[in-house]
Image (tube, grey):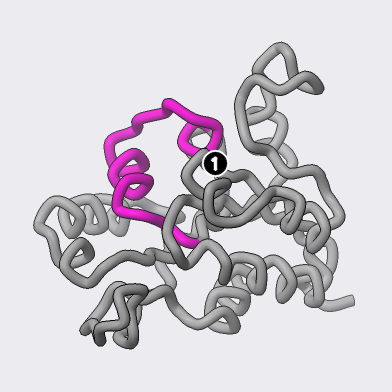
Amino acid sequence: MSEERGKKVVMGVSGSIAAYKACSVVRGLVHRGCEVSVVMTESARRLVGPATFRSLSGRPVTTALWIPEHEAGLVHIELAEWADVMAVVPATANIIGKFACGLADDVLSTLWLAFGGAKLIAPAMNDRMWANVAVQHNVEELKERQGFHFAGPVAGELASGKEGRSGRMAPVDEIVKAVVNL
């Protein structure tokens, strides 16, 4: 049995236009034998519906801390204990800032704080946002912490149609490989 078979991955999806690419990451992980549980921010749900991820993963999608199945509000703890790896694909400047500062005001940022294993961040944003001093400070802060890994961003065409030196989400196969290797 390959190492990735049975690996449990919590994949956070935040509100970047690249959220649609997260569907392919889920599919790639499932094809590699991983179990994937998706957690979405409110902004991500405006871009891709939870039903898409539920269909691709075969598992329920978590969109809030307070859901009927988890009235006690412990879904973030349950997922943190369940998972082997946590990946955030795509990661916006906002969610990276929350992670760096230890802020927890939604299900994804709360889960991030509760999860103690290896974490992968796949940033995706406009190249000017990526180059912003505050964003770079937050990224460097996270890179200094043990167990945090980054995939991308890379140069290429951005959502605006312009070419960016950086900011585009890393290729799907690169992200899948990085998650499996954690």
**Which SS type dominates the magenta stretch?**
helix
Give coordinates of residue 48: x percent, y percent: 60, 56
Nearest to the observer: residue 121 or residue 125 = 125
Of all residues shown, which one is farthest toward the left?
133
Can you name the residue that lies furthest to the right here? 1
Q: Residue at x 65, y 17 (%)?
A: 73
Classify residue 13 as left or right of residue 38. left
State the residue at coordinates (39%, 53%): 146
Reply above or below: 101 against 159: above
Q: Position of residue 42 (x, y in %)?
A: 52, 39
The residue stretch that appears in magenta: 90-110
The picture quadrant where one finds residue 29 is bottom right
* Residue 182 colored in magenta in the image: no
Badge 1 is on which residue? 116
Name which residue type carries label 1: Gly
Residue in front for this viewpoint, 22 or 96: 22
